[in-house]
Amino acid sequence: MSTSAFGYIVLLGAPGAGKGTQAERLESDLGLPHIATGDLFRAALKQQTELGKLAQSYMDRGVLVPDDVTIAMVRERFTQPDAAKGAILDGFPRTVDQATALDAMLQERGAGVTLAPYIKVTTETLLSRLAGRWVCRRCGGVYHMLYNPPAREGVCDSCGGELYQRSDDTPATQLHRIEVYLSETAPLIEFYRDRGLLAEVDGEQNIDGVYRDLLERVRRATQRPS
Ligand code: ADP
Ligand code: ADP
Ligand code: ZN
């Protein structure tokens, strides 16, 4: 019997925990779209839209873009047909108000959050992951100069695009983003634990190890016979 994935997965974890890296893999294995609010803001910025310019002023300082702006952007993204049977949410929600808005948005379509995997790592690990992060300018693919290097330095393995370091991956902004995470986003761990949706995953393992644990939890929660 074939199976297909169905459900809305909320990836929790601090900046640099590995959410984007894992979400890329889940997307290709489960056939659910990877929706990353950071990527949506960066795409808007590249196109120099009003939304992009507004978001940049917050992103550069390592603080959160206001909830109303972020929620409206996600609501818009959810109207696209690929999100009809589920999605892998990466970097959203980041506040309790965003989580409440997400519940309401999903309820409108007769759905809800399926699972909230929490990729748990120490602050020391976060800093070494952020410091070595390189991202593809063309496809958004994520690399690390030590832990996940591209075959050719500075060049994306999957699309040949140029790799760059994000302007908010500087040491000062990194620390600030982790502080913002602890005060505004970490409360979501209890939010989802209280609802019986939290799945803790040991994020200190290498990328394959984290993925093995994560996929097992996500598969169990999302697979329906078809
Ligand atoms: P990281 O992968 O390092 O956690 P992201 O790419 O997810 O970073 O986010 C980069 C920046 O975009 C954040 O520091 C914040 O300014 C903004 N941002 C992304 N998602 C959200 C969100 N859900 N709410 C508010 N701001 C967000
Ligand atoms: P997030 O989306 O949570 O901010 P990323 O997926 O961008 O995190 O990962 C941050 C950096 O750490 C990237 O350079 C990525 O290649 C690297 N990375 C991700 N997961 C691991 C892991 N399990 N072990 C080592 N490095 C990792
Ligand atoms: Zn690429």
Image (cartoon, rainbow, N blue to C red):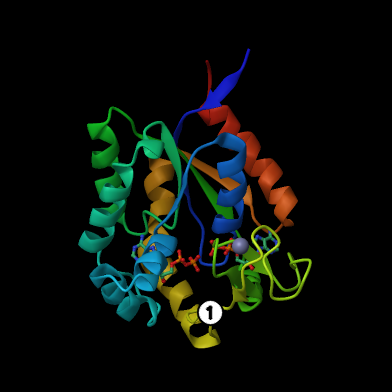
Residue at image position (64%, 60%) is 159
Residue 68 is left or right of residue 199, and the answer is: left
Image quarter of residue 215: top right
Q: Is residue 40 above or below residue 128?
A: above
Element on which disc 1 rests: loop
Q: Residue placed farthest to the top in the image?
A: 1
- Quarter the N terminus occupies: top right
Q: Residue 54 placed where, x, y %?
A: 26, 75
Image quarter of residue 51: bottom left
Q: Residue 120 placed where, x, y %?
A: 59, 56
Residue at image position (55%, 57%) is 20
Residue 206 is left or right of residue 30, and the answer is: right
Q: Is mark 1 within 8 Å of ligand 1?
A: yes
Q: Residue 2 placed where, x, y %?
A: 61, 17
Image quarter of residue 140: bottom right
Residue 107 seen in the current view: yes
Q: Residue placed farthest to the front in the image?
A: 160
The answer to which of 84 and 121 lies nearer the viewer is 84
Q: Amino acid at mark 1?
A: Asp
Residue identified by numbered label 1: 169
Quarter of the image where ligand 1 sits? bottom left
Residue 113 is left or right of residue 75, and the answer is: right
Q: Residue placed farthest to the bottom in the image?
A: 172
The answer to which of 101 and 182 lies nearer the viewer is 101
Residue 196 seen in the current view: no
Residue 173 is left or right of residue 183, and the answer is: right
